[in-house]
Structure formats: C-alpha cells, structure tokens
C-alpha cells in the first residue's frame, strides 16, 4: 500500500468501450446494410492460411513424384564392365557400354505399349525366302521380351511349314479344325482355354502357333471372309499377331492379310532371284494402292553360309530406297537344318540380330 491507495490489480482488462461507439452509426454512403434474413458467406477455413500448411511442407504426391524425378543410376550388367564390377565387389561401378545401351534401347522398344492389337505380316512370293523362320524368330523375340500374348499364324493358302518348324504340342490341330469349330467362338462364346485346343504353345518361346493345314491334299482354299473370322477370334486373346503368308499374291487370304497389316516385313536371301521376286511384289503392292505400307516396311536379308555369288550392296541399295529399314540376319546352322526352332538353342549373335530386327518392327507399330 502506498499513500493509502490499494495496489493495482494485475490484468488483463476488458477493452475500454467508448460510449459514442455504442451508439448506432449511420450506414456508409452507397452501402446497403444486410437484410435481417440475408445468407451470410461461408466461414473461412481457419487452417487454410496457417504457416505449417503453406510453408512448403511436402505432401504424399510430392513424395511419390521423387521416384520419377530421380531414376536409378545405370550400371553395367554385360561384358567386361560388368565382370570388373563383380570382381571388385561393387567398389568399382561402371556405366553401361555402347553395346549394352543399344541392347537395352532395343528391348525397351520391343516392350513398349502399342495401344491395341497389331498385326505384322511377313511376305515374299518366292519359296525359301525365309518367311517362316522370320515369323518364328520375331514371335520368339517379342514373346521373350514382352512375356506372351503373341501368336504366330500360318496363313498359307495350301500346305504350310510353320507348324513343322515350331515345337510340337499335345495336339496337331490346324486352322482347318478351327474353321470347322468357329461356331464355338461366335458371339460371347469361347475362352482362352478353349482356344488352346487349336494353337500350339511354344514353351520358353512365350508365344503360340496357329498352324495351317499340313496335308498336301487339302480341300478348298481359305477365303477372305474366313481370314477375317479367324482374326476376329484370335484378336480377343493376343496383342500381337505375326502372319506367315503363302506364295500366291492373288489368293483371297493373302490379300485379306495385306488389308489387315500394321507392319509389313519383307524377307529374302542375299541372292538376286530372291530379291527380285520381293521387288516385283512391292511393285504389285504399290500398284494396288498400298504405297504407305511399302514405305514403312522393314526388309530382312538373310545371309547364306558363304558370300559366294551374292550381290549384297545392290540389294541393300534397292530396298533402302523403297522401304523404311534394311537389316541383315546372320547365317545360323540350326535354322538351316530345317529342325524345330528353340530360342535357347540359338547363338547369341542370332538372338541379338533378331532383337535388332524386332526393335525396327516395333518402331513401326
């Protein structure tokens, strides 16, 4: 106590009210007071402007996005670089060499999403031009790198050899049997298990084969409508179809295959007679209004065991001027033997070459 006065009472104190402020104030000019029942604006979220929300604190979306923004640093997995890395227990880490980078790019091209069903048709009216082998090796390569949903279809109008060069299955049915039983697949009928009674699984190749009639005394030739019906059925179960063709460019099923083609592959041996037959076929396709199909085609030249009596530079120049790409397929004794083909039995050089061919095909899909 000081001078007889009580000590001050500690705060806080209520705000001082000016008596004048308690009187009703006239409205501002031009501003109407709110009506008694007028709906008020929704309240502002009190947390919206809080600093701990808007100060850059990461969100789950940003956390997930970091994985895309920072890919793993590539290291060598093939060749001497990989061996050195393994020998040093990972202390020395080397980037992939040029060959490995190209290999991975080819694999990525083969694995990319094509956005729907695609058909690759392999053609050359000359027998022995490597069509069947090309269909099998392309289907093997795509099956191996993509993991299935690949079909190799022998659309030969007479006796074909695709089923003979493929691995055998528990049955020997062909496209003729499937044509006889088409009613089992019409409409919403037919499952992938039902289709396995007509296609032949290729095991490690990761693809299936639909063989043509293997009898030399086959009945009527396949029509365009029969090709369309079979294609509609198999398109329910496969993403990629490789079609082997016969030698008659005037056959209905040959023409139907051309009309359904997304990517054309022209095969030939490195001999003038095989190449000339392919060149005349390109003339026919261009004259029938399929110029774009020809320009986007991939030409595959199969090398013989010896380079005697071949004119490779002239063949390469001609088809490079008419098609999108010209690639060489090395000679492989296993392929030349006529025996069924297995992916695991092919040489590394052959597998790498056909991966390069497959990447060129995929680029056009």
Image (cartoon, grey):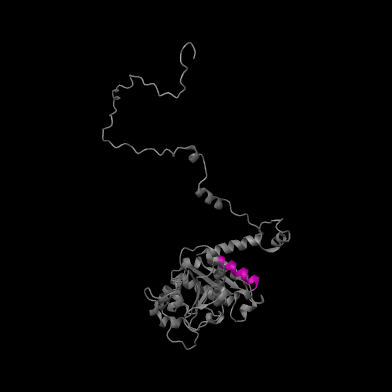
Quadrant housing residue 273: bottom right
Residue 129, image x, y percentages: 56, 77
Quadrant housing residue 340: bottom right
Residue 277, image x, y percentages: 53, 76
Tell whether 132 sits left or right of 22: right
Residue 326, image x, y percentages: 57, 67
Determine if residue 320 is in view.
no
Of 186 and 312, which appears nearest the observer?
A: 186
Q: Is residue 247 magenta?
A: no
Name the outermost residue toward the bottom. 217
Q: Is residue 350 magenta?
A: yes
Q: How many marks?
A: 0
Determine if residue 5 is in view.
yes
Residue 253, image x, y percentages: 44, 77
What is the span of residues highlighted in magenta in the rendered image?
347-359
Establish if 208 lies above or below 51.
below
Of 365 and 71, which appears nearest the observer?
A: 71
Residue at point 54%, 64% (across, down) = 111
Q: Main secondary structure of the magenta part?
A: helix
Establish if 11 lies above or below 96.
above
């Amino acid at each position: 106590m000081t001078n007889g006065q009580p000590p001050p009472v500690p705060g806080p104190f209520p705000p001082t009210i000016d008596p004048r402020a308690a009187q009703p104030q006239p409205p501002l000019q031009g501003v109407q007071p709110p009506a008694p029942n007028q709906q008020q604006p929704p309240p502002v979220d009190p947390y919206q402007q809080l600093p701990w929300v808007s100060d850059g604190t990461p969100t789950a979306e940003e956390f997930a996005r970091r994985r895309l923004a920072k890919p793993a640093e590539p290291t060598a997995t093939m060749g001497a670089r990989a061996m050195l890395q393994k020998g040093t227990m990972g202390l020395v880490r080397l980037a992939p060499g040029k060959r490995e980078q190209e290999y991975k790019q080819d694999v990525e091209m083969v694995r990319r999403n094509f956005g729907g069903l695609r058909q690759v048709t392999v053609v050359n009216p000359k027998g022995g031009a490597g069509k069947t082998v090309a269909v099998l090796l392309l289907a093997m390569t795509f099956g191996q790198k993509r993991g299935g949903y690949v079909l190799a279809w022998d659309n030969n109008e007479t006796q074909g050899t695709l089923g003979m060069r493929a691995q055998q299955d528990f049955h020997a049915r062909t496209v003729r049997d499937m044509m006889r039983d088409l009613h089992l697949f019409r409409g919403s009928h037919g499952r992938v298990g039902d289709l396995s009674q007509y296609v032949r699984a290729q095991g490690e190749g990761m693809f299936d084969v639909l063989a043509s009639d293997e009898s030399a005394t086959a009945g009527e030739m396949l029509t365009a409508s029969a090709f369309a019906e079979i294609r509609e059925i198999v398109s329910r179960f496969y993403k990629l179809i490789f079609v082997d063709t016969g030698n008659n460019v005037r056959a209905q099923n040959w023409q139907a295959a051309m009309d359904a083609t997304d990517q054309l592959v022209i095969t030939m041996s490195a001999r003038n007679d095989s190449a000339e037959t392919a060149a005349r076929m390109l003339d026919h396709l261009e004259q029938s209004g399929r110029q774009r199909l020809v320009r986007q085609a991939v030409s595959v030249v199969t090398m013989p065991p010896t380079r005697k009596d071949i004119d490779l530079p002239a063949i390469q120049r001609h088809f490079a001027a008419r098609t999108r790409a010209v690639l060489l397929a090395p000679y492989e004794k296993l392929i030349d033997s006529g025996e069924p083909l297995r992916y695991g039995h092919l040489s590394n050089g052959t597998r790498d070459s056909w991966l390069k061919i497959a990447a060129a095909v995929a680029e056009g899909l």
